[in-house]
Structure formats: C-alpha cells, structure tokens
Image (tube, helix red, strand yellow):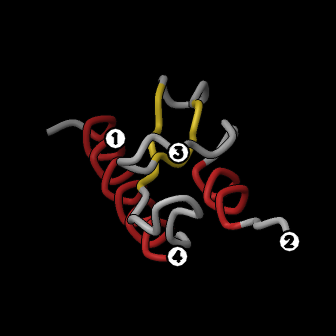
Amino acid sequence: MNMQKIIEEVRAVSEQVQREALERELMPCPFCGGTARLVIEGEIGHEYCFVLCPCGACGPGKATPAQAAQAWNVRTT
C-alpha cells in the first residue's frame, strides 16, 4: 500500500468520525421532532454540506459539515 492511499484512508476515517460526532449534536427537527443527518455532496475541497431530516426539512447549505450543523442548530424564537 502506498503512502498516498494510506493518507486518503486516514482522511476518510477522520471525516467519518467528525461527521458522526456532529450528527450526535444535531438538534431534533423543528417541524417533526425527527432525527436529522448531515449530507455532504461534492469532492474534497468543493463540498456542499447541509442537514436533512426524513420529513424533508433541510438546513442551509454550507461549506463545511461543522457550519451546516451549527446553522441547523440555530433556532429563531
């Protein structure tokens, strides 16, 4: 296994761990109370991240998973 492949695998595992940690911190959906998840589209360096609930509620698109999670957790009163 070459070094580049090892680096890519470590990066993928690290991103998965970060994603799982962020998903545990997501607040329930403000519409249905359901459990939402982070969605990451695109390629590394050109990602589009947002939070999506099975009911169809969707948070704003952001550049990073952390920004998407933070935006989802902001509630207006």
Above or below, 7 against 36 in this view is: above
Q: Amino acid at mark 2?
A: Thr
Q: Amino acid at mark 3?
A: Ala
| Mark 2 or mark 3, earlier in chain | 3
Q: CA distance from mark 3 to mark 4?
A: 17 Å
Query: Mark 1 near mark 4, Cβ–Cβ under 8 Å?
Result: no
**SS of the residue at dot 3?**
loop
Above or below, 39 against 13 in this view is: above
Q: CA distance from mark 2 to mark 3?
A: 18 Å
Instruction: Tell me the residue at 27%/46% (across/down).
Output: 9
Q: Choose mark 3 or mark 4, whichever is in front.
A: 3
Q: Measuring from the top left, give residue 60's x and y in whole percent.
A: 69, 41
Which quadrant: the N terminus? top left
Q: Amino acid at mark 4?
A: Glu
Above or below, 77 against 72 in this view is: below
Quick one: label 3, few (<14), some, or many (20+) residues within 10 Å?
some
Query: Mark 1 near mark 2, Cβ–Cβ under 8 Å?
Result: no
| Mark 3 or mark 4, earlier in chain | 4
Q: Measuring from the top left, give residue 76's x and y in whole percent.
A: 83, 65
Residue 73 placement: quadrant: bottom right
Q: Which mark is residue 8?
A: 1
Question: Which residue is denoted by mark 2 in the rendering?
Answer: 77
Query: Mark 1 near mark 3, Cβ–Cβ under 8 Å?
Result: no
